Image: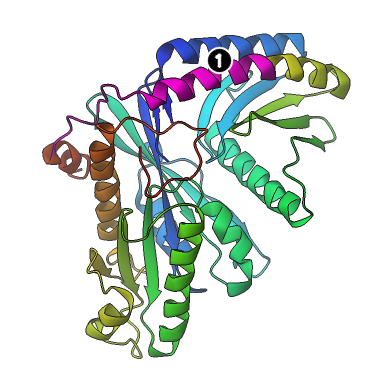
Amino acid sequence: MVMYEAEYEQIKKVCDRLVREANSKVVFLVDKNGQLIASAGDVGHLDTTSLASLTAGNIAATGGIAKLINEKEFSQIFHEGERDNLHISIIGQRVILVVIFDQRSSLGLVRLRVRKASEELNTIFSSIAAKAEQPGASPFAEITDDDIDSLFSG
Amino acid sequence: MSFINYSSREINCKIVYYGPGLCGKTTNLQYIYNKTSPDAKGKMISLATETERTLFFDFLPLSLGEIRGFKTRFHLYTVPGQVFYDASRKLILKGVDGVVFVADSQIERVEANLESVENLRTNLSEQGYDLDRIPYVVQYNKRDLPNAATVDELRKLLNPKAVPEFEATATTGVGVFDTLKAVAKLVLQELRKGADAGASPISSPPRRGPVT
């Protein structure tokens, strides 16, 4: 997956708005392989890399369970905690949207806002996918063995 | 599948440590974690049973430095080695950029190694990858044990294609970083090769070989 600045800004805008409109604490987007794509809200105290990896693992495991009972996937998952809750949804079968919220919001509101944001995000990711189909300049076409070796010289 | 982010100027790649139960996959990651400076690593996560056997995966994010202005990050994963966790192993291989096969050098584990490497090939091909085409290295672990088979014997059985191979004793760290460096290099070289071919869209179905 390749993320360009223009699309990243669009994604970030949708995530920032979702935090506000859903009255949530944190929103983050993860690809299905566990890489964090974007995050918004109060993420300062969160280990977003670990969260991304575990969320993708969670979705992968849930998807595995779905297949075993002849379901395509579970597109929405909700975890209820004592203080914070987690709403996880899959967008366009490609990325995972996670919303963390507490009693200041509600599952109904989160689901409503997530639905709208999902449509917008799906459009953006479709355009990223289309862009990726076209061959373009990559910073890695030019890397040399020396560049690679220099990473390991420390 | 590597993730290139032009906005944050980062590149993330996924490396999976594969091998039979108790071969030392988690020990490899633990050694790397212990020997890496705090600013270059994230938290190591182990989803393990009460008896410290890997239940789902171990995860260790590592930062290697910059290439052409891009921060290079590797996400290291292990799979659960025990035979009956096959469903989990398949999930962890999704989006893999490089694989380390950790072999248990002990003579009595030869069959388990063979079974695991065959399982790796099968599970990779289910994801659309070909073991002969992806960045792949073999580590012969537990070289310090008296019942270790010779490297020649292990090579014949486990590394017929002569991919880069390393002798290791993961508990003391021998060979651990050499293995990691080798697979990371192969991943970056693959990235360079794939760069001309255009990048893979995130929505694409599995392809033959990881096109990045």
Left or right for B181, reference A66: left
Mark 1: amino acid:
Ile
The picture places residue A12, in percent across and down from the top left corner, at 55, 13
Q: Quadrant of residue A144?
A: top left
Q: From the viewer's perspective, tell me whether residue A119 is left or right of residue B185.
A: right
Residue B170: in sight, yes or no? yes
Magenta residues (range): A118-144
Q: Which residue is mark 1?
A: A11
Residue B180 can be seen in this image = no
Q: Which quadrant holds the C terminus of chain B?
A: top left
Residue at position x 35%, y 52% from top? B35
Instruction: Tell me which corner region of the image, top left, top right, bottom left or bottom right, holds residue A68.
Output: bottom right
Q: Which residue sits at x=32%, y=58%?
A: B136
* Quadrant in the rendering for residue A47: top right
- Residue B201 % position (x, y): 45, 31
Q: Position of residue B183 (x, y in %)?
A: 29, 53
* Residue at image coords 19%, 40%: A148
Q: Position of residue B86 (x, y in %)?
A: 59, 66
